[in-house]
Image (cartoon, helix red, strand yellow):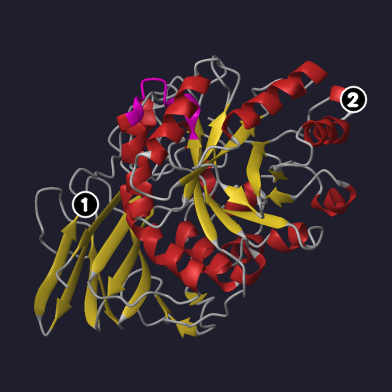
Amino acid sequence: MESTRRDDANETSSTTSINSAANVEIDLSGLIGDVVHVVDNLLNLPTSEGQEKLVVAHHMVGNTYPYIIDDWKRDIQLASSHSIDGFALNIGRDEWMGDRVADAYSAAQSSGTNFKLFLSLDMTSLPCASEADIQALERWVLRFAHHPNQLVYKGKPLVSTFAGEGCSCGGNFSAAWTLFRNLMKGNVQFVPSLFVDPGTLATMPFLDGIFNWNGGWPTQLNEQSSARQIAEAVASLNTDATYLSGLIEKTYIAPVSPWFFTHYGPDTWNKNWIYRGDDWLYVNRWEELVNMRDSVNIVEIISWNDYGESHYIGPIAGAQPNSQGWVDGFDHQGWLELSSYYIQAFKTGSFPQITEDRVFVWARPHPKNVDAPDHVPRPQYADLTDDFFWAIIFSKSPAIAILYTPDPDTHSIESPAATIDIPAGVTKLRHPLATGKTMAVRLEREGAPVLDYRADGFLFDPNPKVYNFNAWVGWTAGTK
């Protein structure tokens, strides 16, 4: 579990939206209900000659204490089947992690895939104050550097970090990481996530690139942000340019993340806030990355299994970091299914053809303004979210979409419902949540339902026992 809040989180109810891929503004004033509708055209995008595009996912080894090789193999095969190329293995100071990482590499080798792994050194856990500390990092890397499933990028084993700007060996972090590079005799593609002014990156010769960790969320927003600032953040998460300007001909790892909520009290990690995950955050960021793919070498999904921060897209497995109160029952694998479409677009420059109807929905499980009898206070920035459910529809041909909030045991469409004509392609919709109700989407063609999805297991609860700003994610597919 990790996070660094170096900036700050939001809220919007805009009635128009601009499709970043097609640059088409759509007037929404005549829609029924509170719905935003955006169509993504299938575009052929420019390719980068000779530049391999990779997508990896951040995997928290700290949450794998009970894993055996078969667990790693399940994760690897599942990720690979969704076009993910590898895992960034986040490691800390616990000695048992070496065995889990070794199991991960063994599982990758026997998985029947070409799946790759690389180390992400968690420098909020690993020490780096002495030369012996840096030598220990070198040993970590050398242990797996020549494994056939090590991710080699630009001819060298890739190594990343979470943080590292606090390292003091040699007097400052620049001296510490220069020593690390020297110990590796330059045989490393070192692409850390350092929380520093990106304008200073060009002054750091030990870098082979940078991972812009916080670029996947609107971290610049806080409760004092104006409506205009929120709207601008919703329109673009693009902090990438400030990093790329200092990285001429170096490797850039860009982040994408579907959500962020953590809820630890002062008696544990004292982390209790959200970033705004509204506005189809995950999809909008993917679209942004597809459009700027010529400048991005690797996309890293944050995360596969960081349950403590609620942005996992893999199955809930292993050992949770005391996050069961907001994670159990909140599967996110619908986001994994959604990822495949955008991963293929990022890698190839063309959005795949949609051959079956699919619906994806997600929402928080209670109103943002509830007063819960929770020993941990309401999370910071909780006011910066909206009480909607968010939907993405893949439609193989034009259809009518109906968004509604039925009782949990019925498919009955009651007012208020939103009815929209949607074209073939990808459509983004939102609809107000209703307490005591679930969420549902129906697609119709020629007056008959072709897909009817009700979020069984979800209830928008007006009286929760604890604060939970995690997302419940569901999805379904129709026939091809």
Instruction: Write down the region rendered in magenta.
Output: 60-69
Whether residue 144 is in magenta: the answer is no
Mark 2: secondary structure = helix
392 displayed left or right of 155 = left
Looking at the figure, which quarter contains the C terminus? bottom left
The location of residue 134, given as percent across then percent down, is: 76, 24
Residue at x-position 57% and y-position 36%:
380
Residue at x-position 83% and y-position 50%:
201
Question: Can the viewer see residue 472?
Answer: no
Instruction: Determine the CA span between mark 1 and mark 2.
Output: 55 Å
Residue matched to label 1:
455
262 displayed left or right of 210 = left
Q: Quadrant of residue 126?
A: top right
Question: Can the viewer see residue 254?
Answer: yes
Q: Which mark is residue 119?
A: none
The location of residue 168, given as percent across then percent down, is: 84, 24
Q: Amino acid at mark 1?
A: Ala
Packing grade of label 1 (10 A; few <14, some 14-19, many >=20) is: many
Whether residue 68 is in magenta: the answer is yes
The location of residue 85, given as percent across then percent down, is: 46, 52
Q: Quadrant of residue 187?
A: top right
Of residues 333 and 36, the one nearer the viewer is: 333
346 displayed left or right of 180 = left
Of residues 23 and 378, the one nearer the viewer is: 23
Residue matched to label 2:
170
Tell me whether circle 1 and circle 2 mark residues in contact (CB < 8 Å): no
Q: Quadrant of residue 470?
A: top left
